[in-house]
Amino acid sequence: MNTDNGFEQLKLNRQLLNAVEEAGFSMPTEIQSQVIPPALSGQNIIGIAQTGTGKTAAYVLPVLRILNYPQGDEPRALIIAPTRELTLQITSVFEQLGKYTGLRILAVYGGKGFSDQKKKLAEGCDIVAGTPAQVLELYYSGHLILKKVKHFVMDEAERLMDMGFTPQLHKILEVLPRKRQNMLFSATFSDRVKKISDDFVEFPVEVNIVPRIKTATTVEQFIYHVNGFGTKLSLLQSLLQNPELSKVIIFCKSKKTANLLAAFIQENYGTDNLKVLHGDKTQQTRMNAVAAFRNEDIRFLIATDVAARGIDIPGVSHVINFDVPVIYEDYIHRIGRTGRAFATGQSITLVTDADQWHIRKIEKLAGLKIQRQDLPAEVEIIPLSREEEREQAMEIDRQKRKDDPTFQGAFHKSKAEIKRENKRGRKK
């Protein structure tokens, strides 16, 4: 370990330094070096940094250092995260870096393991990481005692807001002890995140590593323009023939599309080379899928945005955005699954005419111009179906009206649609 510039300068104890070294970290990232010292002194923290920059360890290490050793049966630290996947990831980091401390860490989330979580709470723990609904359910049922919590962390705050957890967060804040250390972490600092931070983080040390919505510099980003779904599949087939795409996450907008892509890829690469991750899968299935991908038992992981922030897997070579996300921060989080921990990676986004508007917004927010690539010669251009052509035209009209409310629309409704609308109007 580098004793001049590494973690030893951050006043961590030997147990933590040994665990950090064994984890392969010799130098703290920027967010870690700026957050850990004030956090160790008990100050409130607001940390804003792009995904993949080490935010989790930035609060895990000071919490572990302050708690120091097991004590009592009730948790002294509570971490709130938006998804089960992120909760499990946070717990994994606590376990990895706290392996020599003896501190007891428990993940709390919905699903089949709920009864086991109650049992483990009864046995005693020092740190709880959980999703808002499950934390409240366990609290109201009397299984989770929060009166000794001295350290409260809200991770991925903007996603918590996006997913509608604000009411649950306020309920949690109401039952926590008033005297505690508060830390909030987020990739972006939207107005909603600022509002909730103002509600509970008093006199914070603000650490803002990057301007709003910046993509990781370790990720090369490319765009292919396609006319529609059929051509997307043709391009995907061409891309996946490249052996450099060795460990690939493919993001799509819906469970339906995820299942269609899985069937398509299985035809070419077999059923044993991919897993699908979306909200309809059981928790155990999702955990198995992530483990298989982490261990490189499979080459492809197909996921909806439910998993975009919860996956922290080294060595992801490529992220493919089969669909352009309409929540622009999701683009940042998707491509942040590659190029992590100073490694490099590539993202490839498939863009239709109806997506161009969203891509311009993403580029403006991120302050960059994504590289355009020509379609490979072997990619077959599949004509749009009438339904898909119609959907794209309607979406483009909707975007133009958003930019200009006086726009009348190039898309004309059919006589049957006009008749139906008139009929609904008369009923009103």
Image: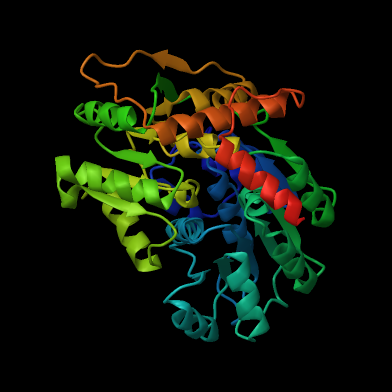
Q: Look at 56% across and 32% down and name the residue there.
A: 394
Give the left or right position of residue 219, taking residue 4 as reference: left
The correct choice, above or below, for 113 with respect to 169 in the image is below
x then y, percent, for residue 144: 62, 80
Question: Is residue 295 visible in this depiction of the protein?
Answer: no
Quadrant of the image containing the C terminus: bottom right
Question: Which quadrant holds residue 1?
Answer: top left
Chosen colour scheme: rainbow
The correct choice, above or below, for 410 with respect to 184 in the image is above
Question: Which quadrant holds residue 199?
Answer: bottom right
x then y, percent, for residue 316: 34, 38
The correct choice, above or below, for 16 with respect to 145 in the image is above
The correct choice, above or below, for 47 with respect to 412 in the image is below
Q: Toward the viewer: 276 or 103?
A: 276
Q: Toward the viewer: 48 or 420?
A: 420
x then y, percent, for residue 35: 66, 43
Give the left or right position of residue 324, taking residue 263 as reference: right
Question: Is residue 325 visible in this depiction of the protein?
Answer: yes
x then y, percent, for residue 200: 81, 57
Give the left or right position of residue 219, taking residue 265 as reference: right
Question: Which quadrant holds residue 319?
Answer: top left
Q: Look at 51% across and 27% down and name the residue there.
A: 354
Q: Toward the viewer: 74 or 426?
A: 426
Give the left or right position of residue 254, taking residue 376 as reference: right
Q: How many marks?
A: 0
Q: Look at 62% across and 37% down and name the residue there.
A: 49
Q: Toward the viewer: 187 or 8?
A: 187
